[in-house]
Image (cartoon, rainbow, N blue to C red):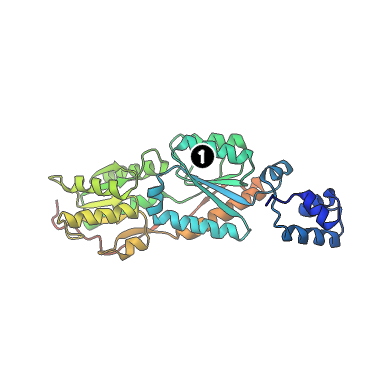
Amino acid sequence: MARPTIADIARRAGVSKGAVSFALNGRPGVSETTRARILQVAQEMNWRPHSAARALGGARADAVGLVLARPARTIGLEPFFGQLLSGLQAGLSVRGTALQLLVVEDTAAEIEVYRRWTSEHRVDGFVLVDLQVRDPRVPVLEELGVPALVIGGPGRHGSLPSVWADDREAMVSIVDYLAALGHRRIAHLAGLPAFQHTQRRIRAVRDSARRLGLTAVSLPTDFSDAEGAAATRTLLARPERPTAIIYDSDVMAVAGLGVAAEMGVAVPGELSIVSFDDSALARIVHPALTALSRDTFALGEQVARTLLAVVDDPDTAGDTKNPTPRLTVRESTAPPALTP
């Protein structure tokens, strides 16, 4: 069946195409009775506005875009993204706004989507995640002039507003806790080194180790369970293995816990494990994982509300700091068996 047009609605309602246009766009020029009749006919015909026509008319798309340049398999495994997406959609749905999600292979493809969706008026704004060092996406979004909100910070995202939590302070709290338990050899399995938050966490581990007189090493990964397991196996095979490992994701932490069991390294008797992310996954394994806790669903809701406010009024743009994630101590951490 062909897509119904304004002309089709006009014929069935017995009015002009101009009257239909006024009614569908909420503009004055028709009586309330005529407007109601036109809207009823449009509903019966299942009429929807064409995206190109909406763009030309300057109408809202009632959608927000989120483009992720990460391996789709990795994203599917991470509870953090599941909670973030759920919170985003919950916050957007209050205003009848959809979340348009696309996973692409790299940053160049992500930028191309920003350009295409903006030109087609597919979305009213974008949520930007995984802020990069010297991020090439920021100047593109500034050039496009489309509302956009960064999850992450502080700083280094141009004029774009952000919602952020202090990754550095959170990581320092982990190292301080492990040092207080008596750990002196600590390893950190970090995420992708191109990400700003990865670099902040690595620097926090390095600076804290220097301040506390610890031996610490950070190894980059792709956040996957496979790389988390491989890196853990390498660390535990060393003659002087670490007595504690910090993982940048709960998925990697659970994979590391499995490797420790496989290699006969008791947790927490011989190895303490801490996850930077908390989730049901971190709570149901045995032993349950010590982790940094925050309400990721609420974070998604806040991002949605903030971006919608920026779409309504760009002058409201600014940076919003979220509470720093707090350490929840569970069974995966304890003092080291032998003091080095």
199 relative position to 110: left or right = left
Look at the image and tell me whether residue 109 can be seen: yes
Residue 291 in which image quadrant: bottom left
Viewer-nearest residue: 97 or 174: 97
Within 10 angstroms of label 1, few (less than 14), some, or many (20 or more) residues? many
Residue 272: % across, % down? 23, 56
Tell which residue pokes out farthest to the front in this image.
1
**Residue 135 visible at all:** no
Q: Is residue 178 above or below residue 130?
A: below
In the foreground, 34 or 213:
34
Query: In front: 1, or 32?
Result: 1
Query: How many numbered marks does the figure carry?
Result: 1
Q: From the top left corner, tell me how far across and down residue 220 is, in percent.
A: 31, 41
Residue 118 found in image quarter: top right
Q: Which amino acid, by three-letter code, is at mark 1?
A: His
Q: Is residue 192 left or right of residue 178?
A: right
- What residue is at 82 percent from the left and 59 percent from the top? 35
234 to the left or right of 172:
left
Residue 160 percent coordinates (x, y) = 56, 42
Q: Read off the residue under disc 1.
A: 157
Q: Position of residue 226 (x, y in %)?
A: 28, 48
Q: Is residue 135 above or below residue 101?
A: above
* Element marked by disc 1: loop
Q: Residue at x 67, y 48 (%)?
A: 313
